[in-house]
Image: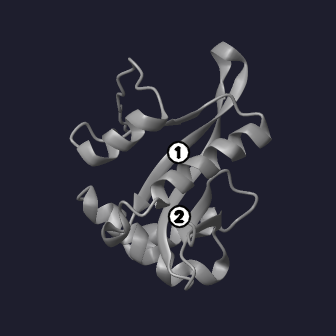
Amino acid sequence: MSDITVRAVRPGDFAQWRVLYRGYADFYEVEQTEEAAATVWSWVTDPAHEVSALVAEDAAGRLLGLAHYRPFARPLSASVGCFLNDLFVAPDHRGSGAADLLLGALRELAAARGWSVVRWITADDNHRARAKYDQVATRTMWVTYDMPPARP
């Protein structure tokens, strides 16, 4: 694990980030267009956009994993939290410690920014990830719903 570092994504990371992000979409069986990926890339490389990205990198400069995150308001507690939208480690690097380092970096970032929590969701059947998450976080009682917007 010592040869893996976590850092903010940089403009020169696009090709490696894209491979990871495609792997993430494939894992969840989500069809992702190049246009959609370009939009997300523009978000994570724009300091003014709310979505940011961290990457896990090995000593040779290979990106092993990514984390997309953003702040979110928590009105009931009058605080701001960190929402981890996407966490992915390349299959051949799972078990390397990259996920631990990405989650640890988010925990440190949350502390530095005064955020009250780091929150994320995962698929119910993502057993390997859930086993990791159970080690570092508390599973909540909340159920997630998605409602489409009204049609014009």
Q: Which mark is residue 58?
A: none
Residue found at x 48% / y 36%: 136
- Which colour style is shown? one colour
Residue at image position (55%, 55%) is 102
> In which quadrant of the rendered view does residue 20 lie?
bottom left
Q: In this view, does 64 lie above or below 139?
A: below
Question: As rendered, which of 8 and 33 lies closer to the eye?
Answer: 8
Is any part of residue 106 visible from this angle?
A: yes
Residue 76, quarter of the rendered image: top right
Marks 1 and 2, Cα distance to the nearest angstrom? Answer: 14 Å
Give the mark toward the camera: 1 or 2: 1
Q: Residue at x 52, y 45 (%)?
A: 84
Q: Is residue 93 left or right of 101 when viewed as pictured?
A: left
- Which amino acid does the dot numbered 1 rest on? Leu
Up/down of 56 relative to 60, above or below:
above
Disc 1 on helix, strand or loop?
A: strand
**Is any part of residue 30 visible from this angle?**
no
Q: Mark 1 points at which residue?
A: 84
What amino acid type should be assigned to the residue bearing mark 2?
Answer: Val
Q: Relative to 47, is 30 on the left or the right?
A: left
Q: In this view, does 58 lie above or below 113?
A: below
**Quarter of the image where the C terminus is located:** top left
Instruction: Pinpoint residue 108: horizontal percent, then vertical percent.
Output: 69, 45
Residue 51 is situated, as x and y percent measured from the top left of the image, at 62, 53
Mark 2: which secondary structure?
Answer: helix
Closer-to-camera residue (134/83): 134
What percent of the width, then of the height, locates residue 114?
77, 34
What label does residue 40 carry, if any?
2
